[in-house]
Image (spheres, coloured by chain):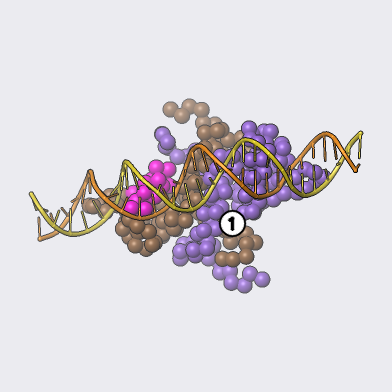
Chain colours: A brown, B purple, C orange, D yellow
Amino acid sequence: MQAIIKPDTDMEDEMPSEAAIHAMAESFKALADPTRLKILALLFDGERGVGEIADHLAVSQSAVSHQLRLLRGLDIVRYRKVGREVYYDLADDHVRDILVRTFEHILHEGGADN
Amino acid sequence: MQAIIKPDTDMEDEMPSEAAIHAMAESFKALADPTRLKILALLFDGERGVGEIADHLAVSQSAVSHQLRLLRGLDIVRYRKVGREVYYDLADDHVRDILVRTFEHILHEGGADN
DNA sequence: TGAATATATGAGCACCTATTCATATATTTT
DNA sequence: AAAATATATGAATAGGTGCTCATATATTCA
C-alpha cells in the first residue's frame, strides 16, 4: 500500500500534490482555533482527562469533546481510556514542534502587543 | 525596546497568554486554506509576481490579491514593488520551517482515510 | 493626454464551523 | 437492579470565510 511515496519531504523541488495540500490545510485548520490551541497548550505538559480540560479552560464538556474528536481524527492527539475516563495527549513531536515554531513566530513578529 | 520579553519561548512552563493564543490561531488560520498554501508552496522556490501566481495556480487575480493581503497582514509574506508589478516572497524562515514540518507530519501520518 | 497593463479593494453571497442543547452510550457505585 | 458519573454525539444556529463581480488605483506606453 502507499506505493507512490517519493522521499520528497523537503518540498523544495516540486509542488506538493493536490492531496498533500489539502491534508496540510486540514492539519492547519485543526490548529486554527483558540479553543483547540488552548487544549493543545494544556496537553503540552502531559495527558489530561476530558473533564479536567473543560474545567481548566472555560469551555463546556460538550465543546471540548467535539474538538477532541476533530483533533483525534487528524492524529494530533491520542487517547487512553481508564475506567470511565479518557485521557488525551499530544500524538507526536511534529505537533510539539509546529506549536513551538508558531509561538516563536508570533513572538518575533514585530507585532506591538503580547 | 521590547522590554518585557521573557525567554519563555518554549511554552513548557506556563500557558501562553490569551493574546498569544489568538495570535497563533490567526497565523494557523492563514495557513489553513488550500489556495494560500499553494501560493506559499510556489513562493517556496523564490519570489513571484501576482499575475504569475494567478496563472500558475488556477485562481483569479482578484482571489490571489485578496489572499496575499491577508498573508501580508500577518507577516507571512513580504513584497517588493517594481514598476507596476509586485513581487511576493516568504517573509522569514519560521514560515518555511512550519510548512516543512507540517508536510512531514501529513506524510508520516499513517492515516488511511479522511 | 489617453489607452493599456498590473494589482488592490469593497460588496454580496454560498459555504463552512464552533458552540449550545438535548440526549445517548459506557462505566462504576450503591 | 437503579443512580451517578464521564464522555460522546446529532441537530440547529450564529458568526466567519473565500470566492466572484465590478470597480478603483497605480504605473507605463504611445
Residue C1 percent coordinates (x, y): 90, 43
Q: Quadrant of the C terminus of chain A?
A: bottom right
Q: Which residue is labeled 1 in the image? A: A105
Residue sitting at the far bottom: B3
Q: Is residue B88 magenta?
A: no
Residue A66 lies, with reference to residue B54, above or below; the image says below
Residue A96 or residue C13, whichever sits in front: C13
Residue flagged by tag 1: what amino acid is it? His
Taking the image as shown, residue A1 lies to the left or right of residue D3, namely right
Magenta part of the chain: A62-79
Identify which residue is drawn at 45% across, 40% down.
B109
Q: Nearer the viewer, residue D18 or B101?
A: D18
**Which residue: 59% across, 56% down?**
A105
| Residue B13 against residue A5 in the figure, above or below | below
Element type where label 1 sits in the image: helix
Residue A8 locus on image (x, y percent): 57, 35
By secondary structure, the bulk of the magenta-drawn segment is best described as helix
Please provide percent x and percent y for residue B30: 57, 48
Residue A76 in view (yes/no): yes
* Residue D1 in the figure: left or right of residue A41: left
Location of residue B58 (image quadrant): top right
Q: Residue at x 48, y 50 (%)?
A: A31
